[in-house]
Image (cartoon, rainbow, N blue to C red):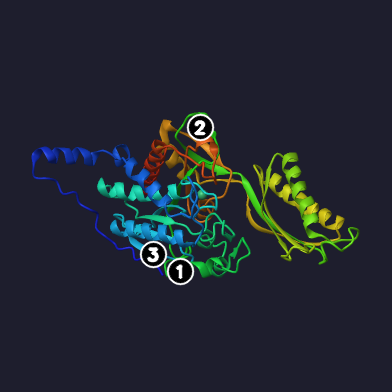
């Protein structure tokens, strides 16, 4: 289903009859909102801490897995906030929430500001929520300051960015960018082996909607995302914010080692086909591989069976990711990892099957959009690169995209220790709003 974007005549400024006020309004009309725009840092900070309460017990942090009861609570809260702003609100089939605010020319696709409310199991208060809350703060501040963009604006809460509960990550933005389907996203399986899928759990919390699912159904002019940096380059540069130039490559794989069932106590050691032993050799070998190739590797999940106290494990699944700054380096790491899996399997007489589940070559965000963020940052910012995936890597496939980084204390994330200062968060929201205004102007100039 499409959003209905109503055509509306340009908003005319009604000047006060009082001469003094009239003078003030006219001089303000000549000043670009980019120079006068401000945001309410107290309100943003309150929102960060208020929404952090929608969490399973997690001292100092947030545990809000995709489509769990707390995810429903934060989604309901977000819905109430954007409805109070008069937004045209929709939820799509993969649970993503859209809050559309009309512009003065609604023939233009909206400029999007998005991120995610879901967290990992050991999440902090900032990774994800900060981006959605900054988008909300920009919409609120624009309204209060009577700033009307030419293009409509849309704030987005993307579903299952983290992939912490259901694999794969970027669950809904992949569908939006045409890289996956609703059916595949609904079938995203539980990482803990439980029978729930992303689709069944979204259905349970009432977040399978009829809103737009793909770029074709609901095109955007651009996508901007505020995110905590999750590393320390801004801290080292002593800057509160940064413009993100691009990302390093990353690929997720899953390898399953198949052995043979047997009694844990009575089977002879010689001739066992123990899949855990093959998997263990493989896991240490990809750590060495990352050191050798100046990349990174992480085993993110291990699952073995049959479950029981007295069984040789005949099946072990290992999920892992590889990262490298260069495309060729990343591809070479993948080729070597395949050879290492084959070696580990043959040493233990195991069968194995390896598949690549998510593949992002290194790349750069859209120069025009990055320029809008860089100008919005001014001297308060510095260029940076992200070392991980974001929904913005998916939107980039269909629309100009850029990200705003906010300084992270000690670069820590996916931890209750994740922290960004109040003033830095406020600066991030300010840069987001100014980036949107810059892009709105860019669209006008391009026309
Ligand atoms: Zn994130």
First in sequence: mark 1 or mark 3?
A: 3
Q: Residue at x 20, y 51 (%)?
A: 12
First in sequence: mark 2 or mark 3?
A: 3
Q: What whole-number distance in Å separates the C-alpha atoms at marks 2 and 1? A: 40 Å
> Dot 3 lies on which element?
strand
x, y (%) of residue 314?
78, 64
Q: What whole-number distance in Å separates the C-alpha atoms at marks 1 and 3? A: 10 Å
- Circle 2 is placed at which residue position? 235
> Dot 1 lies on which element?
loop
First in sequence: mark 2 or mark 1?
A: 1
Q: Residue at x 34, y 55 (%)?
A: 152
Any mark on residue 264, and which? none
x, y (%) of residue 381?
45, 34
Mark 2 C-beta closer than 8 Å to ligand 1: no
Any mark on residue 90, and which? 3
Q: Are the two marked residues, 2 and 3, in contact with CB atoms closer than 8 angstroms?
A: no
x, y (%) of residue 201?
51, 67
Any mark on residue 208, and which? 1
Q: Within 10 Å of the Cα at label 3, are there few (<14), some (14-19), or many (20+) other Cα atoms? A: many
x, y (%) of residue 74?
41, 57
Q: Within 10 Å of the Cα at label 1, are there few (<14), some (14-19), or many (20+) other Cα atoms? A: some
Q: Residue at x 39, y 38 (%)?
A: 422
């Amino acid at each position: 289903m499409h959003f209905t974007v109503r055509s509306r005549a340009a908003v005319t400024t009604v000047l006060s009859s009082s001469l003094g006020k009239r003078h003030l309004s006219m001089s303000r009309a000549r000043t670009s909102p980019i120079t006068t725009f401000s945001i309410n840092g107290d309100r943003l900070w309150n929102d960060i801490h208020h929404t952090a309460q929608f969490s399973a017990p997690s001292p100092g942090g947030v545990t809000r897995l995709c489509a769990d009861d707390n995810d429903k609570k934060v989604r309901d809260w977000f819905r109430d906030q954007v409805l109070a702003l008069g937004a045209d609100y929709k939820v799509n089939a993969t649970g993503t929430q859209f809050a559309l605010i009309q512009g003065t020319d609604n023939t233009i696709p909206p400029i999007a500001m998005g991120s995610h409310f879901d967290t990992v199991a050991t999440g902090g208060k900032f990774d994800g929520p900060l981006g959605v809350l900054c988008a909300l703060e920009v919409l609120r501040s624009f309204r209060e300051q009577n700033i009307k963009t030419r293009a409509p604006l849309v704030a987005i809460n993307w579903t299952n960015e983290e992939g912490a509960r259901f694999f794969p990550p970027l669950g809904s933005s992949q569908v939006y960018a045409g890289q996956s389907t609703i059916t595949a996203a609904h079938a995203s399986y539980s990482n803990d082996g439980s029978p729930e899928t992303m689709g069944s759990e979204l259905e349970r919390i009432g977040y399978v909607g009829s809103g737009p699912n793909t770029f074709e159904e609901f095109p955007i002019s651009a996508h901007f995302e505020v995110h905590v940096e999750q590393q320390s380059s801004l801290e080292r540069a002593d800057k509160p914010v940064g413009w993100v130039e691009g990302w390093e490559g990353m690929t997720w794989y899953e390898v399953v080692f198949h052995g043979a069932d047997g009694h844990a106590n009575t089977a002879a050691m010689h001739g066992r086909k123990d899949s855990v032993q093959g998997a263990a050799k493989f896991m240490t070998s990809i750590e060495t591989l990352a050191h050798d190739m100046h990349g990174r590797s992480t085993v993110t999940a291990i699952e073995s069976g049959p479950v029981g106290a007295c069984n040789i494990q005949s099946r072990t699944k290992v999920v892992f990711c590889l990262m490298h700054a260069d495309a060729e380096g990343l591809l070479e790491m993948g080729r070597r990892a395949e050879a290492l899996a084959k070696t580990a399997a043959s040493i233990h007489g195991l069968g194995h099957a390896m598949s690549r589940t998510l593949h992002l070559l290194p790349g750069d965000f859209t120069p025009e959009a990055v320029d809008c963020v860089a100008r919005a940052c001014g001297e308060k910012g510095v260029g940076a690169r992200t070392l991980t995936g974001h929904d913005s890597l998916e939107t980039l496939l269909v629309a100009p995209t850029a990200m705003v980084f906010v300084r992270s204390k000690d670069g820590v994330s996916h931890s209750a220790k994740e922290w960004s200062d109040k003033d830095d968060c406020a600066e991030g929201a300010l840069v987001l709003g100014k980036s949107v205004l810059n892009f709105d102007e860019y669209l006008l100039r391009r026309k």
